[in-house]
Amino acid sequence: MVEGDHTFGSVSDKIGDLTLKKRTPFHWFIGFGIAFMVAQLLMMTILWLVTKGIGIWGTNQPVGWAFPIINFVWWIGIGHAGTLISAILLLLNQKWRTSINRFAEAMTLFAVACAGLYPVFHTGRPWLAYWLFPYPNTMGIWPQFRSPLMWDVFAVSTYATVSALFWYIGLIPDLATLRDRAKSKFFKFIYAILSWGWRGSARHWHRYEIAYLILAGISTPLVLSVHSIVSFDFSISQIPGWHTTFFPPYFVAGAIYAGFAMVLLLAIPLRHLYNMKDFITKTHLILMGKVMLATGLIVFYAYIMEFFFGWYSGSEYEWFMIKNRIWDGPYWFFYWCLIFCNGISIQFLWFKRFRESEFWLFVISIVVSIGMWLERFVIIVTSLQRDFLPSSWAMYSPTMFDWSMFIGTLGFFFTLIFLFVRFVPVISIFEVRTLLPDANVHGHHQDFEENVNEVEYTYDQTDPPNS
Amino acid sequence: MGNNLYGILAEFDTPTQLVDAARRVRDAGYTMTDAFSPFPLHEIDEALGIKRSVLPYLIFAGGITGLLSGIGLEYFVHVIDWPIIVGGRPHFSLPAFVPPAFEMTILFAAFTAVFGMLFLNGLPAPYHPVFNVPRFALATREKFFLVIESADPLYDYEETRRFMETLDAQEVFDVEE
């Protein structure tokens, strides 16, 4: 999993020095500059939005849930791959996660931050967004816990918090490494504060690994629950095209699919620009390509089943929705774009030639990201624009401000990614150390679960706090 | 010498040497010991005789607290404080109350895991005597360390230091308080 001739020291320096060195590479300024300028679109849109109200968006009856929720679901889905890599692959003992988990988790945090903007601003009065939380207030009212939108508030805020904790706990030992290596007094002080005085004690590591493993264990049902609850926003309603029981697995697979595409889009430039090919190897890219193929096939299966259910339900509204979505309605073109992007493009990944080529992986990842956006567009717009009452049918088209907000969040996301790459170790240093052959005690491999189990049957007593 | 020392620290090059040394230290009867490594080492727990942490039980308790708070909040809001009928559902609509209660369970368990770990580890601890040894900066980079504290009942400066020197260590340091 680690290529090249590395020792504990060389691994620490190679990754740590990206953060510690004084000179910032020129390409960083270019990338950050572009991302930051694009992020200004978001600032501008929000300014205008708060001034004028959400009427500046194209969102209107009957499509009362358009771009904001499309983008919300798209962003939050992208975040899911980060948690999958850090938690689920840890539990499955997949060692290749180690060199990609740090930036995949960062991607999760930033994607959730982008996602969160949409529902908050869609409320129309974002300064009252705290009304979403249950707190005793002078109005004497409470949120409605039977509503999926309330579940969403709990799911997304928990997800954001737990992802941040998981990311931070993983950073503590690496921040201690930076503290001990930093030459500047100022950065030494900052890293000392952020690493909580971590000193690598065996007792600390023991509790640290327990905490890390249990966090992974509880993040796994969490990540599955988050996108399931996001899909409940649709499936609990009675709109044809939304009211289906298979939405949760369909959405979760789609989320992981889109997320892996984004991880690849970040990993490929990262390994070239920062010369991280020893840690993010070809094997990593190929494995991510395979995960994309697998989840993509699940999503494609869901499209086929969606069609089948529409016909098999025998409900005229369901069947009308399918016809309207696929060939009879005004948005049929987007449906077929979606099938091309999500269903056809990934079939190339069956072949070694495409799976092992960074160029093709990159291109397919872009196509899949567009496809997953189209998927949400098709599900949301084609279901709403022609519902039960023909008199209320209407077309939907986004305005300039819908686009500027969406493109603006892309800029915001990449701004955060560039800052992350500059100021935080992009690869988990201490976990990469465990992958080196030198890390084996008496030729015995180090891994997470084994530790906890071993300790379990060796000792049944527990220790007092603060020992 | 040896009066206000925190303990004696030995430096090792490889994890195998550290684990072997830790075993010998434990077999010699020392109990106030600790090891330091740049990444988690699983053999060291058994070699040093580290007891299993209470942390998992705390996290479980945290999760249960979250679950009960979630259900309790929903019960209070929809049954006691503001009962309204929505869509003919009972006031206590358990299936609809599962998602928020589940999320609260995870949230509380996660907080307990992270802050419980830091609390049990006695962190934050910006100062610790071992930091007084300049070479110790390598503990977060590539070297492995073992310390016997002066508070150990078997501790005797001369003898302990001589014993530490027989452990194949790279170097042995006095750690000042």
Image: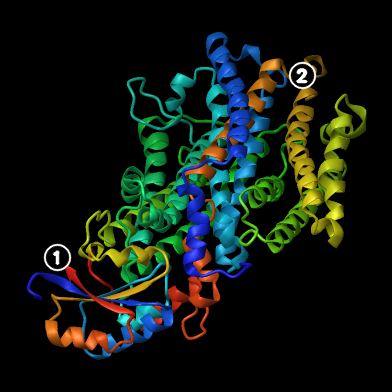
Q: Is residue A389 above or below residue A428?
A: above
Which residue in the protein does label 2 denote? Answer: A397
What residue is drawn where x is 87% and y is 47%? Answer: A344
What residue is drawn where x is 86% and y is 36%? Answer: A337
Compare residues A198 and B173 and report the one nearer the observer.
Answer: B173
Which residue in the protein does label 1 denote? Answer: B177
Residue type, label 2: Ser
Compare residues A256 and A385 and report the one nearer the observer.
Answer: A256
x, y percent for residue A123: 54, 22
Residue A155 seen in render? no
Is label 2 in contact with label 1 (beta carbons under 8 Å)? Answer: no
Residue type, label 1: Glu
Q: Give the side of residue B172 with respect to residue A334, left or right.
A: left
The N terminus of chain A appears in which quarter of the rendering? bottom right
Give residue B81's quadrant in the image: top left
Label 2 SS:
loop
Q: Give the side of residue B157 with respect to residue A45, left or right.
A: left
x, y percent for residue A314: 86, 40
